[in-house]
């Protein structure tokens, strides 16, 4: 009885571990010379392994693709299960203020080690530098064409990850599963023509960023960088708007509300009342609404407010222009930059063709999928690894259970 797992990443390891049972041979094929490469470098070397526990209905909202599909899977293996899996194996986790979860050791090596130890103890047979070139189905078995020859197995779990290039999915061709063109998700916006770039390093803690021409808008911190705009609000927008932005070849306009909670009239009212209390203060040197002074000076320049202008005599035209900068600052996007290389792939295997409870192919019994090879991806914050643990767990346990039926 042999189960083959294709891909030695987070999903592949979790699938192999959960597929293991005495009497079953689990073979883990990895085409490169290293396993768990992304886990190792993830979260800046700390591995953001999951997110703060939350209800499943809220959790799934962090997946621009795969929301409905993962809802079923999370009912079997969710964030709490990730906590207990790692902690019961001697890897305590900690929740940071923004909800991200890391090993207490602050080192991804703890995660790599526990996965490798567990797989080793369970007798998973690692086949390093042995990629799969083709999968042939010979009912009820499968023949894997590997770099070192053909291997016959009873069950196959594909956990080969995402890839921006469609050719990386060629080894799945013979299975006739539909593959949605892979495109990048999680990137920052380049704004090469915008003067705002001069203000690199400035951030606002709770902005709202919209994509003009869509209904998409996300709030959170925003950061101005030397190439454009970044920060959680922008990353979320890039993720939910990945398809639309790709279609527009990453040329679009973003509208920034620098304080997500304030409406246009709130700005007018607050500036007007400030002008009554402090009529002799200079507008340029007295920033309001928590706006950093360099950004405020930039708004004043945009609003043609002279250096000596006092709040008490601020002309309506200038006030309106200043409010426009605060409430709907428009920037032209031309291109993207991958966020600290923590990109994920949007696209991959069409979810309708896979059972969300078992991760089994609806066309080929005994064939399972897990991880980013599927058309599912999350925003930053540990959601992508959570999807890998959940789908890996389900694919592994389902393959193991179905072997017992033979
Ligand atoms: C730099 C970086 C940092 C990240 N940090 C975080 C983070 O902190 N938190 C988070 O939640 N997410 C993070 N992510 C996203 C997360 O790493 C991925 O979503 C996750 O690793 C996907 O796991 P996977 O097992 O599906 O795929 P992968 O980790 O990509 O593993 C797939 C494996 O399959 C192998 N493979 C491919 N084709 C074949 C074949 N034909 N035969 C044999 N082997 C094959 C590949 O070589 C690879 O080793 C990060 C991503 C990157 C790039």
Image (cartoon, rainbow, N blue to C red):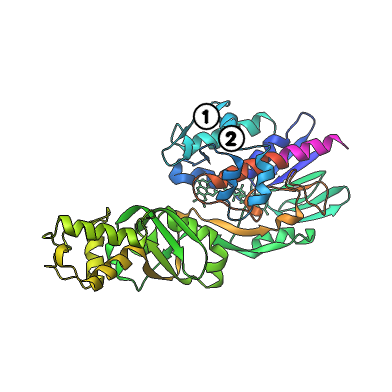
Residue 9 vs 120, above or below: the answer is below
Whether residue 190 is visible, yes or no, is yes
Q: Marks 1 and 2: CB-CB under 8 Å?
A: no
In the image, the segment drawn in magenta is 396-406
Mark-to-mark CA distance, 1 and 2? 11 Å
Q: Which residue is mark 2?
A: 82
Residue 95 is one of the magenta-drawn residues:
no
Label 2 beta carbon less than 8 Å to ligand 1: no
- Rendered residue at 65%/37% (across/down): 77
| The one of 149 and 255 positioned closer to us in this rendering | 255
Residue 405 is one of the magenta-drawn residues:
yes
Secondary structure at badge 2 equals: helix
Secondary structure at badge 1 equals: loop
Whether residue 35 is visible, yes or no, is no
Provide residue 370's location: percent of width, then percent of height: 68, 47
Tell me where residue 96 sits by quadrant.
Answer: top left
- Rendered residue at 63%/44% (across/down): 11
Residue 345 vs 77, above or below: the answer is below
Specify whether 101 is left or right of 332.
right
* Mark number, residue 91: 1
Provide residue 385's location: percent of width, then percent of height: 57, 44
């Amino acid at each position: 009885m042999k189960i083959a797992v294709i891909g030695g990443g987070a999903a592949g390891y979790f699938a192999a571990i959960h597929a293991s049972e005495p009497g079953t041979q689990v073979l883990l094929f990895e085409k490169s010379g290293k396993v768990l490469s992304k886990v190792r470098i993830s979260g800046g070397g700390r591995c953001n392994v999951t997110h703060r526990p939350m209800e499943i209905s809220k959790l799934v909202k962090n997946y621009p693709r795969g929301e409905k599909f993962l809802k079923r899977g999370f009912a079997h293996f969710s964030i709490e299960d990730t906590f207990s899996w790692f902690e019961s194996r001697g890897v305590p986790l900690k929740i940071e203020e923004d909800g991200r979860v890391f090993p207490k050791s602050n080192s991804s090596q703890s995660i790599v080690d526990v996965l490798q130890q567990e797989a080793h103890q369970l007798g998973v047979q690692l086949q390093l530098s042995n990629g799969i070139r083709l999968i042939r189905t010979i009912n009820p078995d499968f023949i894997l064409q590997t770099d070192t020859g053909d291997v016959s197995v009873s069950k196959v779990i594909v956990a080969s990850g995402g890839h921006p290039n469609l050719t990386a999915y060629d080894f799945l061709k013979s299975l006739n599963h539909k593959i949605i063109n892979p495109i990048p998700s999680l990137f920052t916006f380049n704004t090469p023509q915008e003067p705002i770039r001069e203000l690199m390093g400035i951030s606002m803690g709770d902005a709202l960023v919209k994509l003009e021409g869509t209904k998409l808008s996300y709030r959170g911190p925003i950061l101005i960088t030397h190439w454009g705009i970044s920060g959680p609000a922008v990353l979320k927008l890039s993720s939910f708007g990945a398809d639309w932005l790709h279609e527009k070849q990453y040329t679009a306009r973003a509208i920034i509300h620098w304080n997500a909670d304030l409406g246009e009239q709130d700005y007018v009212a607050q500036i007007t009342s400030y002008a009554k209390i402090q009529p002799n203060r200079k507008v340029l040197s007295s920033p309001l609404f928590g706006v950093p002074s360099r950004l405020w000076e930039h708004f004043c320049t945009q609003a043609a407010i002279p250096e000596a202008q006092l709040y008490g005599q601020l002309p309506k035209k200038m006030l309106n222009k200043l409010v426009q900068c605060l409430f709907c600052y428009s920037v032209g996007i031309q291109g993207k930059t991958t966020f600290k290389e923590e990109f994920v792939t949007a696209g991959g295997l069409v979810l309708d063709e896979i059972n969300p409870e078992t991760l089994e192919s609806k066309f080929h019994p005994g064939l399972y999928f897990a991880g980013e090879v599927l058309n599912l991806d999350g925003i930053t914050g540990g959601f992508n690894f959570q999807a890998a643990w959940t789908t890996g767990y389900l694919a592994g346990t389902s393959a193991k259970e179905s072997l017992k039926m033979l």
